[in-house]
Every structure is written in structure tokens, then in C-alpha cells.
Image (cartoon, rainbow, N blue to C red):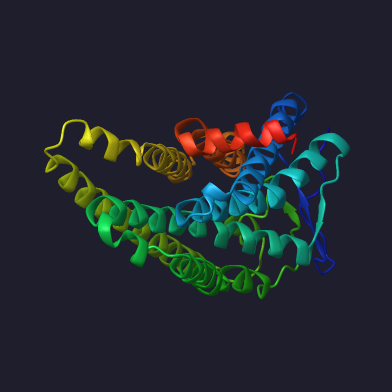
Amino acid sequence: MTSPSNYTTAPVSEFLLICFPNYQSWQHWLSLPLSLLFLLAMGANATLLITIRLEASLHEPMYYLLSLLSLLDMVLCLTVIPKVLAIFWFDLRPISFSACFLQMFIMNSFLPMESCTFMVMAYDRYVAICHPLRYPSIISDQFVAKASAFIIARNALLLSPVPILSARLRYCGKYVIENCICANLSVSRLSCDNITMNRIYQFVAGWTLLGSDFLLIFISYIFILRAVFQLKTEGAAVKALSTCVSHFILILFFSTILLVVVLTNVARKKVPMDILILLNVLHHLIPPVLNPIVYGFQTKELKQGFQKLLQRGF
């Protein structure tokens, strides 16, 4: 299939998404596994949310934070994957100007929201292990509400300038985005304006937020490990660490996938563009699949809640 021309003399009112510009035959093979992963992500997260909602024993701050993580995962998936599948199945490549920048806003703000949620969950585990007697008074429903408001407000406000700066650029000719999604750099490089400020702001804001979140997570686990190793009761250390296993595994997956995407983009001259595009798509799909499954298998209370849900027949 030949790609359309990347240039037009008319003002740009919509963009054209070209997935895998060098290997467009890939999309037919990828559509099935991506569809299955998308359905798995939606189903697993919806099941987790229903289980937490219906099971009274799960009405605790830790599970409320897990519900927030599931909601963020579902929004990210619904923002990216249906459009990708529409391109694969029906060749629906056009995306309107406003829809493109809305997608850009959600992708740029919801990813740091997830890392911020992991940070709050790490603080939850720190208080539970290091200050167990004070846990009910510190990690309350009110704390979760304030933390959720902070997570949403911080990232939405600080990262909204990214799509705003991109939308204010002049797109006076090029309109073909060589990507499956409206990634900021893929879109802004089509502009005939200088995009230096756009690049600098995204780099500084994005890595400041992600870096601070991961630093606080790291500090929390240092205190957790120090407290665990000071426990003298037989089996107490293993029991304490078992409450952190799911959270640690998810952070490991999240950071590893993020690191792979970053490193491949840094080495973009050595890595084929189609690999970069595939990694960007999977980055919005794999964590939503893994998060509910890992917590579901590792957390005894969730497994029991799910079993009760099955017995009720939903």
C-alpha cells in the first residue's frame, strides 16, 4: 500500500496516522494479539473494580488506590488502542486536529498519574510496615481522596502545556504522522515553527515528575527494608515483605517498560522506526494488562473477593 503524500498547501485541519511506515503489512499480524491484550486489559481491570466495589472487606485505602490505578489504566487503553485497531482493521487513518491533541493530553498526563499513584501506594506500604499503629489514623479514606485529587491535579496542570504548545504551532503543510498515536514529538515536528520550547518543556516537566515519583518510591522502600530487617519475630519479615510484593513487581514492570522505550528513542538512529512505534503502543497496553493480574494473583483478599463474586454470579 502506498503512503499518501506528506505535504499539502492547505491549512491542516486533520492528521493522517501511518502505523509502521516501512512495514505496513505488520498491522494485519499485530491486530489479533493487540485485540486480545486490549480485551484482557479491559476485562481484568473491570473485574477488579467490580470486586472491590462489591466486597465490603476490600473497602480499604490500599484497594481504593488500586482502583484508581485501574481507572487510569482503562482510560489510557481506551485513548490509544481502539484508534490503533481502527487503523489496522478499517484503514481509518485520519484523526481530527482536536482529537489528536486530546489524545496527546491524556497520554502525557495519565502516564505520570500512574507513577504518582505508585508513589502514594509506596507511602501506604511504608506507613503500614514502619508505623503500623498509626496506619489507621494516617492512611484514611480522607487521605486517599486528597491523594487522588493531588495525583490528578498535579499532572493535569503541569503537563497540559505540552499539547497546548503543540496545538498553538502552525501546521502549514505536512499532515502525515508516522506513528500510530499522536505522540508530541511525532506531531510537533510536522510544524513549520520552531519547536525547541515544546521539546524542552516536555523533557523537563515529564522527567521532573517521573523522577521525583521514583525517587520517593526508592526512599520509601529503603525505610521499609530497614524496618523489616529489624524485625526479630520469626516469620514477621517474610509476612511484612509479602504485602509489598505485588506493588514492587508492578513498579519493576512499569519502570522497565518505560526505560526500554526511553533508551530505544535515544538510540532512534540505530533502532528501526517501526520498532519504536510498536514499543510506544505496547507501553500503553502491557501495564494495564499486568497490573490487575499481578495484584489478583498475589493478594489473598482480592482472590477471595473474586471467588465470592463468581459465586454470586456478578
Instruction: Tell me, yes or no, if residue 270 can be seen here.
Output: no
Given residues 104 and 219, the one toward you in this image is 219
Relative to 254, does residue 164 appear above or below in the rendering? Answer: below
Q: Quadrant of the C terminus?
A: top right
Identify the image quadrant of residue 267. top left
Furthest residue toward top: 29
Identify the image quadrant of residue 92. top right
Compared across the picture, whether 211 is left or right of 97 comes to left
Callout count: 0
Where is residue 94? Give x, y as percent. 83, 52
Q: Quadrant of the N terminus?
A: top right
Compared across the picture, whether 13 is left or right of 120 comes to right
| Residue at figure coordinates x 20%, y 44% from the top left | 225
Given residues 206 and 129, the one toward you in this image is 129
Relative to 17, does residue 1 appear above or below in the rendering? Answer: above
Given residues 115 and 210, the one toward you in this image is 115
Instruction: Tell me, yes or no, if residue 161 can be seen here.
Output: yes
Where is residue 35? Give x, y as percent. 74, 32
| Residue at figure coordinates x 53%, y 38% from the top left | 302
| Residue at figure coordinates x 71%, y 43% from the top left | 81
Relative to 72, does residue 306 appear above or below in the rendering? Answer: above
Where is residue 180? Give x, y as percent. 70, 45
Where is residue 279? Give x, y as percent. 56, 38
